[in-house]
Image (tube, helix red, strand yellow):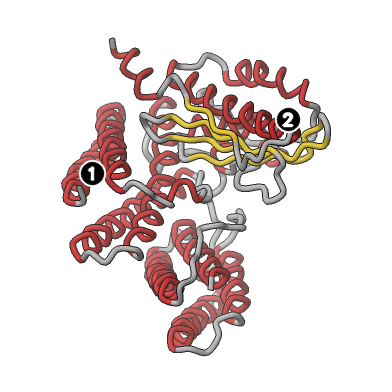
């Protein structure tokens, strides 16, 4: 938790950590010297998440992300990037489960938000790998199978 | 020119959010007026940049400092504007910006001379209490999420429409974009002031170029209409969930405004 939040009394509901990420998302923006860039796109809603990674071998030296998506996507991206910055790639894979635990029970729509964040991160890793293998790829893009729109309809049914 | 554009983008935001954070209605209103003047400076810089065959972007490198008093906000504004004015150059637009901003600095100096203008700032205290209303926790949570979602959306729309307005030669499109920009300014102002009241005032996140460099206007408008529909739905849900007459009326009012946005956007198709 951020230092400034330690003495903040929060009622139940939105927890102070989530509120802090809402007020000031961590690692948000572009990374000029990234060596892995991934985009996950929801073609139905045109919502995207872009991840920038600066990897040194298997260590995440720096990380940034951006999105035009909803606040759930921002909070998950902010928490996830904060958790894995400076860590090894293996830790990052385990962090995905930890984030889900932190967030508690997710709605179907929030699960789609989490999926687009992690898909974008994985696309950035793929871009890094492709470049290492000699590919000339500016960024790696994946298109999402599930959409927020579809999930919302499923919930209504 | 891009650097100057980015500087003005920062100054516009500094002023808008200073006006949200300060409770004194007279100071709030004056700072908001100056923020609108600075938004027009941004627009004019954008137009001149494009006329010169150059380009600009919405990259940002700023934080919203959680100031604790009116005077620290005003002193911060004073420093920002004094620094920025060094980079204005000497053309006609620079002359206009300089005289506008010098007038703002005079106003700020006058405010700082009178200690009765100082007061604590509660816009960042995260207490999440809305005036003297007795709202249930779920209602406060719903309101919080709505305000974060929609304040970002309004900021995003202002910038996207301004970006497209600067690039169209079609008068009808130009006018529709202007109406939509004006409407979004009003919504951002309404939501920003509510966020400050709740103690959760925060700067909307930066726009990535993928968000505002639009290749397909028709798709963008259709997606935008779907988003307006979703915003209408959120307003309706919030209006019925919050058992408070004043707030319910406000969200109904916003809901009806969103309906007309859809009509305006349909003109663009």
Furthest-top residue in this view = A157
Q: Residue B69: give x, y in percent of width and height.
A: 58, 61
Q: B65 left or right of B144?
A: right
Q: Which mark is residue B38?
A: none
Judging depth in this view, the residue of B23 and B2 nearest the camera is B2
Q: Residues within 10 Å of mark 1 (few under 14, many from 20)?
A: many
Q: Which of the chains bears the disc numbered 1?
A: B
Name the residue rendered at 70%, 44% in the picture: A34
Residue pointed to by mark 1: B258
Q: A38 left or right of B129?
A: right
Judging depth in this view, the residue of B74 and B260 nearest the camera is B260
Instruction: Look at the numbered disc 2 and give the secondary structure of its residue.
Output: helix
Q: A93 left or right of B203?
A: right
Instruction: Look at the numbered disc 1 and give the secondary structure of its residue.
Output: helix
Q: Which of the chains bears the disc numbered 2?
A: A
Vertical placement of A117 versus B217: above or below? above
Q: B138 left or right of A97?
A: left
Q: Residue B80: give x, y in percent of width and height.
A: 60, 71
Q: How many marks?
A: 2
Q: Residues within 10 Å of mark 2 (few under 14, many from 20)?
A: many
Q: Residue B248: give x, y in percent of width and height.
A: 25, 36
Q: Which mark is residue A84?
A: 2
Judging depth in this view, the residue of A60 and B189 nearest the camera is A60
Vertical placement of B171 versus A127: above or below? below
């Amino acid at each position: 938790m951020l230092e400034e939040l330690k003495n903040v009394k929060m009622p139940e509901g939105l927890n102070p950590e989530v509120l802090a990420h809402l007020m000031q998302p961590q690692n948000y923006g572009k990374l000029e010297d990234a060596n892995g860039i991934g985009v996950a796109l929801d073609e139905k809603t045109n919502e995207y998440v872009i991840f920038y990674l600066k990897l040194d071998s298997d260590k995440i030296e720096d990380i940034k992300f951006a999105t035009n998506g909803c606040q759930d996507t921002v909070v998950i991206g902010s928490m996830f990037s904060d958790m894995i910055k400076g860590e090894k790639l293996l830790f990052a894979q385990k962090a995905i489960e930890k984030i889900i635990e932190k967030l508690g029970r997710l709605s179907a729509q929030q699960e789609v938000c989490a999926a687009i964040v992690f898909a974008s991160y994985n696309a950035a890793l793929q871009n890094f790998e492709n470049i290492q293998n000699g590919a000339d790829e500016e960024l790696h893009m994946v298109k999402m199978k599930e959409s927020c729109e579809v999930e919302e309809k499923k919930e209504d049914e | 020119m891009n650097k100057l554009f980015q500087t003005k983008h920062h100054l516009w935001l500094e002023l808008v959010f200073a006006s949200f954070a300060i409770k004194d209605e007279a100071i709030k209103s004056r700072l908001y007026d100056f923020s609108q003047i600075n938004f027009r400076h941004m627009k004019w810089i954008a137009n001149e940049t494009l006329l010169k065959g150059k380009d600009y972007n919405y990259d940002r490198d700023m934080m919203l400092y959680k100031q604790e008093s009116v005077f620290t906000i005003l002193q911060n504004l004073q420093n920002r504007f004094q620094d920025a004015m060094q980079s204005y150059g000497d053309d006609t637009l620079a002359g206009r910006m300089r005289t506008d901003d010098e007038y703002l600095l005079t106003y700020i100096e006058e405010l700082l001379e009178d200690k009765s203008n100082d007061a604590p700032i509660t816009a960042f205290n995260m207490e999440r209490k809305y005036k003297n209303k007795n709202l249930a926790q779920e209602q406060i949570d719903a309101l919080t999420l709505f305000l974060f979602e929609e304040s970002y959306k309004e900021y995003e729309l202002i910038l996207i429409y301004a970006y497209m307005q600067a690039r169209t030669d079609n008068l009808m499109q130009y006018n529709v974009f202007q109406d939509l920009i004006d409407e979004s300014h009003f919504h951002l102002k309404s939501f920003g002031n509510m966020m400050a009241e709740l103690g959760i005032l925060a700067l909307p996140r930066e726009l990535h170029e993928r968000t505002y460099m639009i290749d397909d206007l028709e798709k963008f408008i259709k997606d935008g209409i779907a988003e307006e529909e979703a915003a209408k739905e959120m307003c309706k849900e919030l209006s019925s969930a919050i058992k408070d007459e004043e707030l319910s009326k406000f969200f109904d009012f916003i809901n009806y405004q969103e309906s007309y946005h859809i009509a305006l956007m349909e003109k663009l198709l």
